Image (spheres, rainbow, N blue to C red):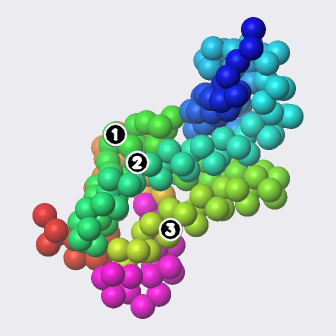
Amino acid sequence: MRYSSGHKAETRERVLKEAAKEIRAKGPDNVAVAGVMARAGLTHGGFYAHFPSKDALVKEAIGTMFADARARSEAIDAKGDPRAVLRAYVDFYLSPAHRDRRDRGCPLPTLSGDFARSKTETRERFGAGVTGIASRLAAPLARLGHADAEAEAHALLAQLVGGVALARAVGDARLSDALLANTHASIFARYGLEAAQ
């Protein structure tokens, strides 16, 4: 059977989306190629028509994870007013829904520790994703007059990621909720986001 020229690209994209979900849910070391292929509706044997190795799949799936995050942020970026943009980022990022959906949320709180132990080229791909998210935060910070918006964005991103990572890691639901709420309140106070309500 002959497939259209776009069939291989569409199939590859389907595999990458499934791999991205599994990596976020289980970490890169626990990705099972056979399971990813099955969820993509393919056989394990077809894997090597798309990727030379599991490491290559993981590296490419990192890009897919960050592309998903970028797509979700486009609606936030369109808000225009820089305080409204920051408020929407913080509201989403520090929400219980984001905390509870490791498989669909931002890869940073879930995977930073895992990728710290990865090969250099994989860490570089992850780092490019970090830079992309930080630049999306830097834009409204610059519009609010922060002289070094990039540095401020890195600090804000670290606080967001840390808040979610800790909220996911603790066993006490009240402490988890408090970590999200206290991080949220601290960021809102620092940037005067209450006025955007």
**Residue labelled with disc 1:** 97
Which quarter of the picture shows residue 138?
A: bottom left
- Cα–Cα span, label 3 and label 2: 15 Å
Instruction: Pick whichever of labels 1 and 3 is earlier in the sequence.
Output: 1
**The C terminus: image quadrant:** bottom left
Residue 2 vs 134, above or below: the answer is above
Residue at position x 47%, y 37% in the image: 104
Mark 3 touching mark 2, by CB under 8 A?
Answer: no
* In the image, residue 71 lies in the stretch drawn in magenta: no
Residue at position x 28%, y 72% in the image: 82
Which quarter of the picture shows residue 131?
A: bottom right
**Residue labelled with disc 2:** 72
Tell me if 143 is positioned left or right of 22 in this view.
Answer: left
**Residue labelled with disc 3:** 134
**In front: label 1 or label 3:** 3
**In front: label 1 or label 2:** 2
Residue 188 visible in the current orientation: no
- Residue count near mark 1 (Cα–Cα under 10 Å), binned few <14, some 14–19, many ≥20: few
Residue at position x 76%, y 52% in the image: 122
- Magenta stretch, residue numbers: 142-160
Mark 2, secondary structure of its residue: helix
Name the amino acid, label 1. Ala
Instruction: Pick whichever of labels 1 and 2 is earlier in the sequence.
Output: 2
